[in-house]
Image (spheres, rainbow, N blue to C red):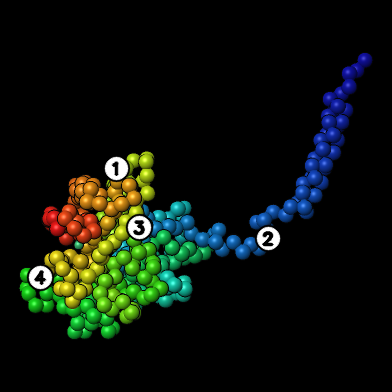
Amino acid sequence: MTSPGPSANGGFKAGWWALLLGALALAAAVLLILHPPHLLLASPFARESRAPAVSASPAVFGRSGQVRVQMVLPNEPFDFPLEVRGDPGSLAYAWVRAQDSAAVTPTQPLVGSRVVAPGFSGFYRLEVESESGRRLIDSILVAVLVPYSAKIGQTINGYRIGNYRSGIESDAPPPPRGFVEVTRESAELPVSKHLRLSDFITHDDQQDRWPKYVALDARVLDKVELVIAYVGAFRGGRNRTVEVDVHSGFRSPVHNQRVPRAARDSRHQYGDAADLAIDADGDGRVTYRDGMLVSLQVEQVERDFPQYVGGLGLYGNQNGVPYVHIDVRGRRVRWKG
Ligand SMILES: [Zn+2]
């Protein structure tokens, strides 16, 4: 008696497997017809998905992580650190206008983090290009300033600024490097999480005149955002959303002379100061107590970030609306108004 040979048994098994594989292949073919793989189809998102994995480095947003604008002069080389994931090959960049994404500069090779600003004042975003596509870095604006040298007499483009003392007195601080040109449309652009460009426009008698010109230092934006974050942390879980009202941002020298109680050499003229009304205790009103709470947080911010040391003025104990003046003049100064 012979047992069934392995070949006979194996032959049966092989036939069974062939049948099974055939059935699976047929099922797969049916599935492919019913659900064609998306990768094989022309997709409108193909360009987007293959674009380089590039984003602005956290350093661009200041120590607070909340700054949304960088101020530079026309054609000025400056650092725009990027985070690049994977190896996108060689990178290039171009500037596009913020309002309509129109390219304004030819594509240039990107070497390290160094870029060169566009040659004309305005608001721009960086577009990064690799062999696989383009990516717009839309998390931060670049404001190209109108240089200080564009001020003719007391005005820029017909907008009254006045005179800085630096041209008259040798011990005066240097004037701003330039001014942000602000139109009705760009006035609403956010310059940080809580602040808009309009917060820094001089409150003078040129309300109907456009464009306006504003001196603005990104360091004061960063300091304000740090103070807001510290006030929120101080409040804890109860209500961390902090509202801020900017009473005064930039003040042109000619307007500063007319402001009662304003210092003759007020830092507001240089764009690195802000007067803030913050409801620090979250009770729905801005009181002198809020000013004291904000002052405590300003002290702590200056201890943690000595690069932002400056003036701290507490106003409104007797009468008037309570507010806190802060600036980044680089020297610790304290006063009560
Ligand atoms: Zn002030």
Let me know if residue 71 appears in the view: yes
Instruction: Report which residue position mark 1 lands on.
Output: 234
Some atom of ligand 1 lies within 8 Å of the CB belonging to the residue at label 3: no
Task: Look at the image and tell me in which quarter the N terminus lies.
Answer: top right
Type of amino acid under label 4: Ala
Q: Is residue 278 above or below residue 47?
A: above
Residue located at (41% from left, 73% from top)? 185
Some atom of ligand 1 lies within 8 Å of the CB belonging to the residue at label 1: no
Task: Look at the image and tell me in which quarter the C terminus lies.
Answer: bottom left
Select label 1 or label 2 by which is in front.
1
Instruction: Report which residue position mark 3 lands on.
Output: 194
Type of amino acid under label 1: Phe
Percent coordinates x, y for residue 171 in the rendering: 6, 70
Select label 4 or label 3 by which is in front.
3
Residue located at (11% from left, 77% from top)? 167
Q: Are marks 1 and 4 in contact (CB under 8 Å)?
A: no
> Looking at the rendering, which quadrant does residue 56 occupy?
bottom left
Mark seen at residue 282: none
Q: Residue furthest front?
A: 319
Percent coordinates x, y for residue 261 in the rendering: 14, 65
Mark positioned earlier in the residue sequence (1 or 4): 4
Secondary structure under the numbered disc 3 in the rendered image: loop
Q: Are marks 1 and 3 in contact (CB under 8 Å)?
A: no
Image quadrant, ligand 1: bottom left
Mark positioned earlier in the residue sequence (1 or 2): 2
Instruction: Report which residue position mark 4 lands on.
Output: 172
Front residue (pair 38, 60): 60
Instruction: Report which residue position mark 2 lands on.
Output: 41
Front residue (pair 146, 76): 146
Type of amino acid under label 3: His
